[in-house]
Image (cartoon, rainbow, N blue to C red):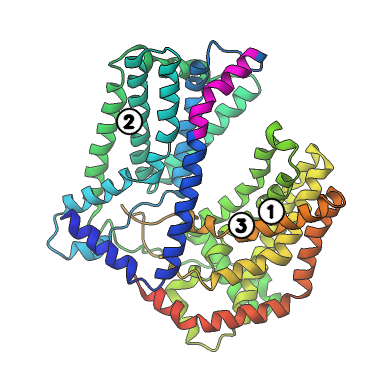
């Protein structure tokens, strides 16, 4: 049975209209996976010695590196839950077609849940914990204690995997987890309450008691059992996998009429963001990138001037990259109807462009607090904003002509649905948009000064605005050439 499921998915992959694109993305994802594996392996093998050095220098007050790791494991679990929710795609095993065939529902659920177990997100932590456990044994820690602790971390990782399966269908679980994580981090930073003093003891318990790994094992068994029965009950065409039926509502968006013909598309996109779960999540997550620059305020990055460029691009371009990266897939459900009408591509593309520009301007205003960290950071934000508006906004639309992945906006919160605001494919498409500004920056910053680097990035954005019409002529031709391939791709439901 499992062999049949794998065979069906392989046919779906090679027969897809976007087969070449999917294959290229798989290869890029493979290189990305190798990079993260190497980084986690190096961190696992060297973190003990790095923490030990910090303790000797008095930068960390703790008994030993193992206790430090255990104290902060609670944040690793929270972070694991967060990035799984945003990046890990739940397996879609062509559920609807299979329900018409003589397959037992239990076997369909087993296969779909089994695919989540072999996810890269479950294997990646092992490249940290295995080298770290070996270092602990070499340093004289109890072998049975280390094995018990390691097994506990392994079972907790798998339990987190199945917890993520639930959160993909229940938003009210995800947001409280993020709120708790942020509250605990801020309370510890300002010395109000340090949760790590208590969680460190809990994780040390798995080391001090060789049988303790049974506790997370029972937790894992409980989540698997509940996941199986929960999703087995959802596998009904008339209930768990039915389309959403919502009462129609109207909004007064007449203020957009000043944009002429573009107003029709702008109103459509605004209504999409207000009413659709995935579009709404993309909208909020895009503005969440405003806080991304705080990551680069750490001492390890503070002296790397190129990090200010990255901060500027990400902080102001979150919505541009996440929402714009899926144009025109947002309109995939009625794309064929649009192409049957006398609708100029230019107006369609310009409406998306104006929406992304408006969001970038708002993000830039929200980033004003970065002035507190220095004018150089603020200049980096402004340079990134101008580059995003003038250049990246057009590049994003150009890339959209080749992203032939339909978005199903009509499905409800189902068991194995795709409800991501953005996925790994979207993130991989950011790479070409981020390399060029860094090259431009260093070309001028190393030969003249940092200010010249920021001016060069902004000037590139201004040139993009000046030649926008010429660029849009090229983009429009590409969309016309890809028109029928895109329609064929959007017609594929699985």
- The numbered mark at residue 313 is 1
Q: Residue 134 lies in what quarter of the image?
A: top left
Q: Residue at x 32, y 15 (%)?
A: 144
Which of the marked residues, 3 or 2, is nearer the chain's N terminus? 2
Which of the 4 image quarters holds residue 264? bottom right
Residue 181: image location, x then y, percent: 52, 32
* Left or right, residue 28 beside residue 205: right
Give x and y (percent) for residue 239.
26, 58
Q: Which residues are magenta?
A: 42-56
Which label sits on residue 155?
2
Quadrant where the C terminus is found in the figure? bottom left
Q: Is residue 271 above or below residue 32?
A: below
* Mark 3: few/some/many CA within 10 Å (<14, 14-19, 20+): many
**Which secondary structure dominates the residues rendered in magenta?**
helix
With respect to residue 225, does 434 lie above or below? below
Q: In the image, what residue occupies the spot 67% across and 71% down?
A: 256
Q: Mark 3 highlights which residue?
A: 319
Q: Is residue 175 among the parts visible in the rendering? A: no
């Amino acid at each position: 049975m499992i062999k049949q499921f794998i065979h069906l998915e392989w046919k779906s992959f090679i027969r897809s209209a976007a087969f070449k694109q999917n294959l290229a993305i798989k290869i890029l994802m493979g290189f990305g996976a190798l990079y993260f594996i190497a980084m986690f392996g190096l961190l696992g093998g060297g973190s003990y010695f790095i923490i030990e050095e910090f303790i000797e220098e008095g930068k960390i007050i703790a008994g030993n590196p193992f206790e430090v790791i255990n104290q902060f494991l609670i944040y690793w679990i929270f972070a694991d839950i967060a990035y799984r929710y945003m990046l890990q795609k739940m397996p879609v095993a062509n559920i609807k077609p299979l329900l018409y065939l003589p397959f037992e529902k239990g076997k369909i659920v087993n296969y779909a849940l089994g695919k989540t177990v072999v996810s890269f997100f479950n294997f990646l932590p092992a490249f940290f914990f295995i080298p770290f456990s070996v270092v602990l044994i070499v340093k004289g820690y109890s072998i049975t204690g280390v094995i018990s602790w390691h097994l506990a971390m392994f079972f907790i990782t798998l339990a987190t995997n199945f917890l993520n399966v639930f959160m993909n269908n229940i938003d009210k679980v995800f947001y409280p987890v993020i709120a708790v994580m942020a509250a605990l981090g801020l309370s510890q930073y300002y010395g109000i309450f340090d949760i790590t003093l208590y969680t460190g003891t809990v994780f040390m318990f798995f080391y001090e008691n060789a049988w303790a790994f049974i506790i997370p094992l029972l937790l894992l068994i409980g989540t698997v059992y509940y996941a199986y029965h929960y999703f087995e009950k959802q596998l009904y065409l008339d209930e768990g996998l039915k389309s959403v039926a919502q009462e129609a509502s109207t909004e007064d968006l007449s203020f957009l009429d000043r944009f002429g013909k573009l107003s029709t598309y702008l109103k459509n996109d605004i209504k999409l963001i207000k009413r659709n779960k995935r579009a709404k999540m993309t909208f909020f997550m895009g503005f969440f990138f405003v806080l991304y620059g705080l990551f680069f305020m750490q001492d390890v990055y503070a002296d790397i001037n190129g990090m200010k460029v990255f901060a500027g691009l990400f902080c102001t371009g979150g919505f541009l990259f996440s929402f714009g990266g899926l144009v025109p897939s947002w309109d995939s459900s009625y794309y064929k109807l649009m192409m049957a009408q006398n609708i100029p591509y230019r107006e369609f593309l310009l409406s998306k462009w104006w929406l992304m520009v408006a969001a970038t301007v708002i993000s830039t205003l929200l980033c004003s607090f970065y002035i507190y960290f220095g004018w150089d950071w603020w200049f980096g934000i402004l340079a990134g904003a101008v580059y995003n508006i003038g250049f990246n906004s057009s590049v994003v639309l150009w890339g959209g002509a080749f992203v032939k992945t339909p978005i199903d906006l009509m499905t409800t919160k189902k068991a194995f649905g795709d409800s991501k605001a953005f996925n790994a494919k979207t993130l991989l498409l950011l790479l070409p948009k981020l390399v060029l500004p860094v090259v431009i920056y260093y070309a001028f910053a190393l030969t003249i000064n940092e200010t010249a680097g920021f001016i060069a990035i902004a000037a590139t954005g201004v040139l993009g605005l000046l030649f926008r019409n010429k660029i849009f002529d090229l983009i429009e031709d590409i969309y016309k050439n890809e028109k029928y391939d895109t329609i064929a791709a959007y017609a594929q439901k699985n």
